[in-house]
Image (cartoon, grey):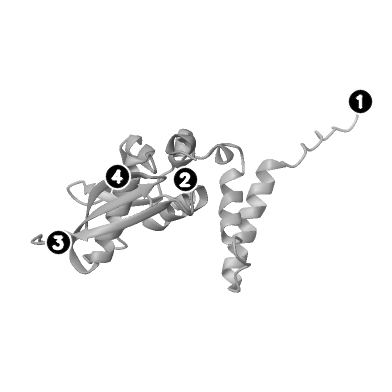
Amino acid sequence: MKLSDVQKRLQAPFPAHMVAWKPAAFNRDRSRALMLAHIDARAVQDRLDAICPDAWSFEIEVVPGTRQPTVKGRLTVLGVTREDIGEAPEGDLGTLKAASSDALKRCAVHFGIGRYLYDLPKTWADWDDAKRAPTQTPELPDWARPDHERTPGGAHLMQAMEQLRYELPEDLDLQREVYKHLKAALGSLHPAPPQPTPQHPGRAA
């Protein structure tokens, strides 16, 4: 197997529930935020494990003398190596582990993993500064979703299946959440039949 054999699978969009959003800029009163879509390092690892579990590796080298923890990552997939720099964010999250995760994601982009997220249009959302979160999660366009999520109910089914990947959660609220997504998905895939039009008295059926 060569890298060119799996390129399309590496570049494929991730399920929408695996895409997270973070603010990149705010308006003057911080009531609106420019949101950037991203995936975490675990999603990259899962993608590589699904496609070539025994044919990829990742190494890091700490870059000395930087203000924030910084590493140079080296990702090898099917004998092809790509390198990039990873930096940790400011504050308490500024650790070498965070820098390593950033490096892995940046290296993965060189292989096409998650690269499509850079092509998303600018997305501004209402921002709740007290909760440090958007009031509503932005929606991905159809082209940035897997094929199975472009059909009615597909996204609901995939989220429910992901929650059932290992076992049904013991928490009752989580069980209700799984049920809600399955019901919504099945309802979209199999809509209720139209109801007959009521007949008025004296009118022929």
Q: Is residue 88 left or right of residue 56?
A: left
Q: Which of marks 3 and 4 is nearer the N terminus?
A: 3
Residue type beneath disc 2: Phe
* Mark 2 surroundings: few (<14), some (14-19) or many (≥20) residues within 10 A: many
* Mark 4 surroundings: few (<14), some (14-19) or many (≥20) residues within 10 A: some
Residue 91 image position (x, y, % from top left)? 19, 66
Q: Which of marks 3 and 1 is in front?
A: 3
Q: Is residue 9 visible?
A: yes
Q: In this view, does 12 lie to the left or right of 190?
A: left
Residue drawn at x 62%, y 67% is 167
Residue 168 image position (x, y, % from top left)? 63, 67
Say the numbered circle drawn on residue 14.
2
Q: In this view, does 51 lie to the left or right of 177?
A: left
Depth check: give the residue in front, 114 or 179: 114
Report the Cα–Cα distance between label 3 and label 4. 23 Å
Q: Which of marks 2 and 4 is in front?
A: 4
Residue 18 image position (x, y, % from top left)? 45, 52
Report the Cα–Cα distance between label 3 and label 2. 30 Å
Report the Cα–Cα distance between label 3 and label 1. 81 Å
Report the Cα–Cα distance between label 4 and label 1. 75 Å
Say the numbered circle drawn on residue 204.
1
Q: Are the residues at dot 2 and dot 4 in contact (C-beta closer than 8 Å)?
A: no
Q: Which of marks 3 and 2 is nearer the N terminus?
A: 2
Q: Can residue 127 be seen in this view?
A: no
* Mark 3 surroundings: few (<14), some (14-19) or many (≥20) residues within 10 A: some
Residue type beneath disc 4: Arg
Residue type beneath disc 1: Ala
Residue 74 image position (x, y, % from top left)? 28, 51
Mark 2 element type: loop
Residue beneath disc 4: 82
